[in-house]
Image (cartoon, rainbow, N blue to C red):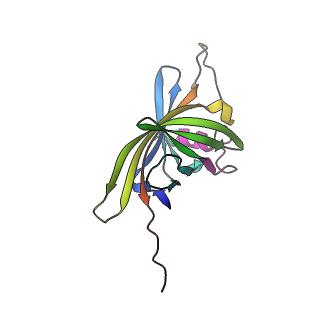
Amino acid sequence: MSKIWNIDPTHSEVQFKVKHLVISTVTGTFKTFSGSLETSGDTFDGAKASFSLDTASVDTNVADRDGHLKSADFFDAEKYPKLTFEGNLKQVGDDFKLVGDLTVKDITKPIELDVELGGTMVDGYGQNKAGFEINGKINRKEFGLTWSMVTEAGGVVVGDDVKLHLNVQVVEQVKEAAAV
């Protein structure tokens, strides 16, 4: 019997980190996102995962930088409003791998992220929930985010590797009772 688990955006976050001038790290988030897991049975092993976020919801706490990230130099949010992922959870020991295709702009590439299941719990409203911590790294240039600048001293302004960190809580979708 399959179950659908939808992301609870009020108890989830999507963060990224990228090096700036090679000496410090800039952290950003995406504020608007959705996704789900479809499981068969009582395990998350093999669950089908789908996720999307609004590229215009990027937030680094600096309005000018956010505007640059939304521009054609990076996400081109007007032309490509969504970043998407389709894949599966695969159990590896006590943890999982999230394996699938990430699409940024019009470029789709396979990625693999590490997933730790925090556990499952029934909340005070009787809703079955599960929590996951997801970590990994992608190369931004492989997804068409190629803008770069070199300083006078020869340093790179934006690093190529982007660390991804997601804390995701999902809630099991309750099936409607059949009409009699």
Is residue 39 placed above or below 19 in the rendered structure?
Answer: below
* Residue toward you, 40 or 174: 40
Q: Position of 166 compared to 101: left or right? A: left
Q: Position of residue 135 (x, y in %)?
A: 47, 35
Q: Which residues are magenta?
A: 64-86
Front-lying residue, 114 or 63: 114
Callout count = 0
Any part of residue 139 in sight: yes
User: Is residue 164 visible to us here?
Assistant: no
Horizontal and vertical percent for residue 99? Answer: 57, 40
> Is 24 located above or below residue 66 in the figure?
above
Q: Position of residue 32 (x, y in %)?
A: 51, 53
Residue at screen point 46% across, 70% down: 175
Q: What residue appears at the point 48 percent right and 31 percent down from the top-left corner?
A: 26
Single out the residue that lies furthest toward the left: 124
Q: Is residue 68 magenta?
A: yes
**Left or right of residue 160, residue 129 in this image:** left
Seen at 51% across and 33% down, the residue is 136
Q: Is residue 120 magenta?
A: no
Residue at 54 percent across and 42 percent down: it is 66
Q: Residue furthest bottom?
A: 180
**Quadrant of residue 142 in the image?**
top right
**Residue 2: image x %, image y %?**
51, 60
Seen from the viewer's position, the closer of residues 135 and 10 is: 135
